Image (cartoon, coloured by chain):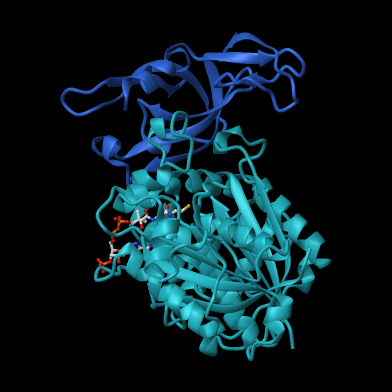
Amino acid sequence: MREVAVIGCGMTKFGELWKQSLRDIFVEAGLKAIDDANVDRISSMYVGSMTPGLFVGQEHVGAMMADYLGKSHIPAVRVESACCSGGMAFRLGFFEVASGHSDVVMVGGVEKMTDGADVTYALATAADQEYEVYHGVTFPGLYAMIARAHMHKYGTTRQQLALVSVKNHHNGALNPNAQFRSEVTVDQVIKATMVADPLTILDSSPVSDGAACVILASMDVAKRMKKPAIKVLGTGAATDTLALHAREDITTLKAVRQSAEAAYKMAGLKPTDIDLAEVHDCFSIAEICIIEELDFVEKGKGGLFTEQGHTALNGRIPVNPSGGLKSKGHPVGATGVAQIVEVVEQLRGQAEKRQVKNARIGLTQNMGGSGASSVVHIFEVQK
Amino acid sequence: MPSPRYHREMPQRYRLEAGKCNTCGHVAFPPRMVCNCGCRDFKDERVSDFGKILTFTTIRVAPKDFETQVPYSVAIVESDNGVRVTTQVVDCRPEDIKIGKKVKFVFRKMYTEGHTGIICYGYKAVLV
Ligand SMILES: CC(C)(COP(=O)(O)OP(=O)(O)OC[C@H]1O[C@@H](n2cnc3c(N)ncnc32)[C@H](O)[C@@H]1OP(=O)(O)O)[C@@H](O)C(=O)NCCC(=O)NCCS
């Protein structure tokens, strides 16, 4: 396989973007990425989007986005893996360039969630319709059950869960693209409106609109560019049972562990080599489970690790410097690509107030459903 | 819900019909064609009527079909023959539910689809 690098990136602000349509936000992010990379031709396009059909009644968004980006006729396809549609789209774009088939490929992610659809229902279609959703369970409900099990098994506290949101809101307040640019306190998180016990609205990622795009190129092309190439060192993906209840252990996200192991192996790196990580904190408990599965900390100690400040912006391994899904926002299909945009900006040293010092190697972890799919990428800046 | 989709799941929802793998003994619910051990040979089995709560939550923001029911509690229950399901826990207060408590499956109405749609039924759990 050839070496591949990210040579450009762009994203919209995340939030309630009522003035812009699905295609508007995608094109905004796409043009930013094209301008940032300074390329005039792309060979093909992968668009991560979870369910534009349910959110705005639009399918076939691969062709649509190529059309509105002024790239009609190039191959373009939508990729779906629930909330990790964006990350999975990136993986496919990576393979297209790595295989030698194409030199320059665009990968984007987009979701338009605030146009009035029944969002709770639309998101729940990523769970098992007949055996989970039929019984009235929601996504916050599934993660709430993971949280309760984690608290019971490992003694993780309500306060530790809240500290994930406190940290991510702190980082997000420094991010001009974030949906919620306000700090929150532990007390505010715990006393906020209950969504699914023990998780409150401030443990939950919000409903958002947004798009993010990156341009991938072969290392030969990347080396000719002015900006430092962000090399893709590793990719890993895995799946697990669709239904949460079918897992051997409800607190274990096996797909996250397996996707991380594959990416670490391909990159030839260990968890301690990672300088910063963007992970899928769709709910506070998810970040705690994920940092355990990524082996940043041993199983069961994720809450304590967070409480000790190791995942803070100036901690041992900064997690979600962008503000994460919690504060930056979670337009589901866009999230995986937006995580990569953040890592690219961090590794280029362009993250301004939320810049992680001496960041050289970054990791992204994007997850679908209650952990039924996960994809991990590892990046290194080329000096 | 289109009625064919509803009708197909009736053996599971009404009668808890499952399949037991003839190689590794895993009880699959819903029944499936291939076991994780690779075996394709199953015999009929039922999910036992009793089980225990592994984890639970109380839903306060619900999809439209369930909006009139909030707050309602949902749990992952492991039956005495090792089947795990997601199910509502009813006829009790949320604060009565604890991890490890014994439950029994009962046949209940789930929700009604508008004024003219299907009345949906299935299993729920009650504390014993
Ligand atoms: C948590 C959730 C149910 C809240 O939705 P809601 O009850 O409809 O909340 P509303 O939209 O009425 O918002 C009420 C207020 O809280 C704010 N708010 C909403 N969600 C928020 C969040 N997650 N964090 C912080 N503030 C939030 C809103 O901006 C609004 O503030 P305002 O009154 O000042 O305008 C919803 O955001 C949700 O479902 N999140 C989970 C999304 C999800 O499951 N994603 C997939 C994960 S795999």
As rendered, which of A30 and A55 lies closer to the eye?
A30
Tell me: residue A80, above or below residue A347.
above
> Quadrant of residue A321 in the image?
bottom right
Image quadrant holding the C terminus of chain A, namely bottom right
Image quadrant holding the N terminus of chain A, namely bottom right
Identify the residue at horizontal 46%, vertical 58% (top origin): A333
> Quadrant of residue A305 in the image?
bottom right
Chain depicted in blue: B
Identify the residue at horizontal 52%, vertical 84% (top origin): A36
As rendered, which of A185 and A257 lies closer to the eye?
A257
**Figure colour of chain A:** cyan
Percent across and percent down for residue A130 are 44, 29
Q: Residue furthest front?
A: A73
- Ligand 1, image quadrant it occupies: bottom left
Tell me: residue A175, above or below residue B50.
below
Percent across and percent down for residue A275 are 70, 77
Q: Is residue A270 left or right of residue A117?
A: right
Q: Is residue A274 left or right of residue A40?
A: right
Percent across and percent down for residue A282 are 49, 58
Q: Residue furthest left?
A: B115
* Total residue callouts: 0
Q: Residue furthest right?
A: A268
Identify the residue at horizontal 62%, vertical 88% (top origin): A349
Residue A87 in view in this figure: yes
Percent across and percent down for residue A374 are 62, 52
Residue A158 in view in this figure: no
As rendered, which of A362 and B58 lies closer to the eye?
A362
Q: Is residue A55 left or right of residue A303?
A: left
As rendered, which of A37 and B116 lies closer to the eye?
A37
